[in-house]
Image (spheres, helix red, strand yellow):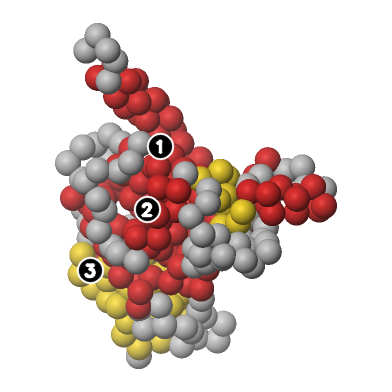
């Protein structure tokens, strides 16, 4: 029997009464188990298979897959699952983790990132999804990319490979990374790319500096420069889709909560900075 610490990322029905359990372990990366009979009401494992929980999993090898035999819940993150915004954020974290992790490969840094972000979501006092939450999710995604081998070079153009220096730069999906604006535009014209998601993202120098500092640290500053958060969000989304070659399903669910909330937040900021206020 094998015993592993893990975070439950996804539960998928298999046949009538079984489930496929996808989890992330710090020791061996992505794990998949067949949980027999766990969709039955009387199943002993059913109450412990709590999505996004940190658990200890017991399993035995099977002919085609490992079979789950025991689950011990270490950290259930109970409040997270009582809010739609919590579920939306945790779903995004889980999808990113599953997509970027590999089987039979230790992922201790990714595991710590996932656990830390789930804990942040669990402890959130506001049931609504605010700009600070969106920024945290974007930074989580970029850090997850970095620890799985997709950290962009901040000082070198991804097109011409010359130093970027202090000039304004863009973030490009192809080739992946930061680039001189002229290099990215010229490459796009040569390749004939007309896709909107392939367009380079113009960045303020403050955004590149912010990303360089934040990807090296796990804390989030109390004050974020104006306009930086929106650019960070666009960089994270573009980077994920470039690496995964697909859009994230959980992103659509998040959009249901972010659009109106961010618009209202920006309107209040504009009013507070108006000459008449």
Write the residue at 48% across / 55% down. 166
Residue 141, picture quadrant: bottom left
Of label 3 and label 1, which has the lower sequence position?
A: 3
Extreme-front residue of the structure:
166
* Relative image position of residue 264 (x, y in whole percent): 34, 23
In terms of depth relative to the viewer, which is nearer, 155 or 237? 155
- For the point 49% across and 63% down, the residue is 154
Q: Nearer the viewer, residue 10 or 168?
A: 168
Q: Position of residue 7 (x, y in %)?
A: 33, 68
Rendered location of residue 24, percent (x, y): 40, 71
Per the image, the residue denoted by label 2 is 210
Circle nearer the N terminus (3, 2)? 3
Q: Is residue 21 left or right of residue 46?
A: right
Per the image, the residue denoted by label 3 is 73
Q: Residue 91 or 44: which is nearer the viewer?
A: 91
Q: Residues within 10 Å of mark 2 (few under 14, many from 20)?
A: some
Q: Can residue 7 be seen at all in this image of the molecule?
A: no
Whole-angstrom CA distance, mark 3 to mark 2, is: 37 Å
Residue 227: mark: 1
Q: Residue at x 55, y 86 (%)?
A: 63
| Residue at the spot 24% in from the left edge and 36% down from the top edge | 127
Mark 3 and mark 1: Cα distance apart in space: 41 Å
Q: Quadrant of the N terminus?
A: bottom left
Choose mark 3 or mark 1, whichever is in front: 1
**Mark 3 touches mark 2? (CB < 8 Å):** no
Q: Quadrant of residue 229?
A: top left
């Amino acid at each position: 029997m094998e015993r592993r610490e893990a975070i439950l990322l996804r539960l998928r029905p298999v046949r009538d009464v079984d489930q496929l359990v996808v989890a992330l372990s710090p020791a061996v990366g992505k794990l998949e188990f067949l949980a027999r009979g766990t969709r039955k009401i009387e199943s002993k494992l059913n109450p412990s298979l709590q999505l996004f929980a940190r658990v200890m999993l017991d399993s035995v090898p099977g002919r085609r897959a490992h079979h789950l035999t025991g689950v011990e819940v270490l950290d259930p993150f109970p409040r997270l699952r009582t809010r739609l915004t919590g579920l939306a954020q945790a779903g995004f974290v889980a999808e990113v983790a599953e997509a970027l992790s590999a089987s039979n490969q230790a992922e201790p840094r990714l595991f710590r990132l996932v656990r830390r972000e789930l804990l942040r979501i669990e402890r959130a006092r506001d049931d609504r999804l605010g700009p600070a939450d969106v920024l945290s999710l974007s930074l989580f995604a970029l850090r997850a990319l970095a620890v799985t081998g997709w950290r962009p070079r901040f000082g070198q153009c991804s097109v011409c490979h010359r130093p970027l220096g202090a000039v304004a730069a863009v973030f490009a999906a192809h080739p992946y990374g930061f680039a001189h604006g002229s290099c990215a535009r010229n490459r796009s014209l040569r390749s004939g790319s007309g896709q909107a998601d392939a367009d380079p993202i113009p960045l303020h120098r403050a955004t590149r500096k912010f990303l360089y500092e934040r990807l090296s640290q796990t804390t989030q500053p109390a004050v974020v420069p104006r306009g930086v958060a929106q650019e960070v969000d666009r960089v994270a989304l573009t980077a994920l889709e470039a690496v995964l070659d697909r859009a994230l399903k959980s992103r659509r669910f998040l959009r249901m909560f972010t659009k109106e909330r961010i618009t209202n937040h920006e309107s209040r900021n504009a009013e507070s900075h108006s000459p008449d206020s």
